[in-house]
Image (cartoon, helix red, strand yellow):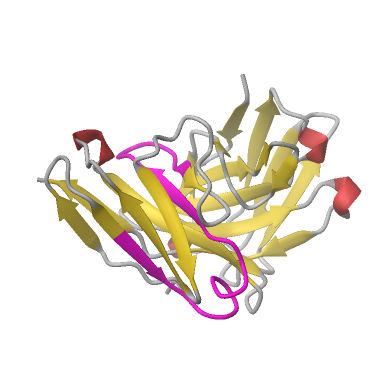
Amino acid sequence: EVQLVESGGGLVKPGGSLRLSCAASGLTFSNAWMSWVRQAPGKGLEWVGRIKSKTDGGTTDYAAPVKGRFTISRDDSKNTLYLQMNSLKTEDTAVYYCTTGCRISGTYYPNAFDIWGQGTMVTVSS
Amino acid sequence: QSVLTQPPSASGTPGQRVTISCSGSSSNIGSKTVNWYQQLPGTAPKLLIYSNNQRPSGVPDRFSGSKSGTSASLAISGLQSEDEADYYCAAWDDSLNGYVFGTGTKVTVL
């Protein structure tokens, strides 16, 4: 069974830092492009950023609101994705999901997110 | 503020057909494929449609997607009570160099 499990969420003060982890199982993690998506309470979905597979360059892309503050990394030896969040703001309060694309009939769709974790809550408040 | 605009709500009675629109621009829908997600209350989103009009395995054929120019649509035919959820369109945006979700549409089954 393919599974993504996030951890590391919690309460942090504005200006603080937090690192989220996403443990993957049941998929070839090293080949996967991984993304983080967040959802503020009562609001819609917001893409945070992604990291490509190392074979595709391992590069990262970020949404404007988090660029320069958040860093996505991966450890393929541990099948784990990370989201390092610095200089946190109250508007970063959200459920954070890790997700990845799908492979259908031999074609990989990196932006068709069909595997999602259960999410981890991050609350930024004084 | 999302660059993909959806109506905030849509509704229908059981068995009816409901259509949700998603309006974008040349840098996203106009040049990229569109995906649709369903999110039931308190759960993670689920991929409903990928590549404009393709259904992943297990998604009922009551759900269909289409795209024309800088707009896309999701249709739910034969509406059922379990379809009551939030629906989001999404696409890559070349100008933003990022993935963008629509504003979301809450579907209510009357």
* Front residue of B72 and A23: B72
What number of labels is visible? 0
Residue occupying image coordinates x 39% and y 62%:
B73
Is A90 drawn above or below residue A1 in the view shown?
Answer: below
Q: Is residue B59 left or right of residue B94?
A: left
Where is residue A3, by image quadrant? top right
Residue occupying image coordinates x 33% and y 53%:
B75
What secondary structure prevails in the magenta region? loop
The C terminus of chain B appears in which quarter of the rendering? top left
Q: Is residue B60 left or right of residue A2?
A: left
Where is residue B94, by image quadrant? bottom right
Visible residue check, residue A126: no
Q: Can you name the residue that lies furthest to the top here?
A: A1
Is A116 drawn above or below residue A70 in the view shown?
Answer: above
Looking at the rendering, the stretch of residues picked out in magenta corresponds to B20-47
x, y percentage for residue B62?
34, 41
The N terminus of chain B appears in which quarter of the rendering? bottom left
x, y percentage for residue A98?
59, 42
Visible residue check, residue A16: yes
Any magenta on residue B69?
no
Residue occupying image coordinates x 47% and y 75%:
B24
Is A103 drawn above or below residue B94 in the view shown?
Answer: above
Residue occupying image coordinates x 82% and y 37%:
A30
x, y percentage for residue A19?
64, 45
x, y percentage for residue B39?
37, 44
Q: Is residue B102 left or right of residue B110?
A: right
* Front residue of A68 and B12: B12
* Front residue of A24 and A84: A24
